[in-house]
Amino acid sequence: MTLADLLASASHRQKSVTVFGPDAYPALSETLSGFDVTVSHEYLPVPPARGYLTLREGDRFLGSINAPSFAELATPTDRVPWDDRRRDSAYRKLVDTLANTTFRAADRSQLLATSREFEDRAYRVGGGTLHVGFQSARAFRRQTAVYEHLATETDLSIHVYVDASWDVPSLDGVAVHAEDADEIGRFWIVAFDGAGDDDAKCGLLATETAPGAFDGIWAYDPDLIDDVDAYLRKTYVG
């Protein structure tokens, strides 16, 4: 079993997005084009700001987002996890409704914003284990303040995985695993075990397939998160 195997085995459910308004909002369609979703447009004779979208999985209604929030979906914020302003964001709705949906060519800003949503969930729970894997030493150094804050302000057990060849700092309260393994440094990993609560488990697993473009999945599937957690503990934590 490897991280690649776990990603390949991840179950996903195709969802449908219907955009209602005077046009199809091309920027929104581009944002959603990388996800395993069907996108359709239904003309609605209203001003552009009165449009909205709905998300469904089969016959099940998942949620809606109004047109003034579409810009946030295209350029999501990367506010720190403990910033309360992210709690009612349109991007949080998108993350929730597209959970367990595979994506192709998602950009770095989307994955960073999604990582922040999962870090926020870990911050609010305040305990359990958070696993994080980076794809470059530079990316890790940019986030050191975030993980030191999480380690200081919560009872989280935080494990960070980096390539053994990188020059990275040690962090107070954070276990940094420098590993000489091909998969470490290839995968963007965020996995939170929910402190044993299945409803709080969440994770992201992705690989960079082109500069700035990623394939993978983000999920609330407790079985997948348990598998990622068990694999990382067995292989690298010991």
Image: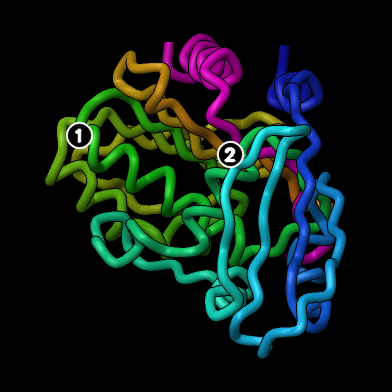
Residue 53 against residue 95 in the figure, above or below: below
Dot 2 amino acid type: Leu
Magenta range is 210-238
How many numbered dots are placed on residues in this image? 2
Quarter location, residue 146: bottom left
Which residue is nearer to you in this view: 123 or 136?
123
Which residue is nearer to you in this view: 125 or 189?
125
| Image quadrant where one finds the N terminus | top right
Return the x and y of residue 191 as percentages of the image width and height.
48, 32
Local packing at callout 2 (Cα closer than 10 Å; few below 14, some 14-19, many 20+) is: many
Quarter location, residue 59: top right
Task: Determine whether the residue tagged by mark 2 lies in a helix, strand or loop.
Answer: strand
Task: Determine whether the residue tagged by mark 1 lies in a helix, strand or loop.
Answer: loop
Check residue 204 in the rendering and tell me which mark sits there, or answer none.
2
Q: Is residue 127 left or right of residue 119?
A: left
Check residue 126 in the rendering and tell me which mark sits there, or answer none.
1
The residue shown at (54%, 51%) is 166
The residue shown at (46%, 15%) is 233
| In the image, residue 211 lies in the stretch drawn in magenta | yes
Q: Is residue 179 left or right of residue 211?
A: left
Return the x and y of residue 212 as percentages of the image width and height.
74, 65
Dot 1 amino acid type: Gly
Return the x and y of residue 113 as percentages of the image width and height.
50, 60
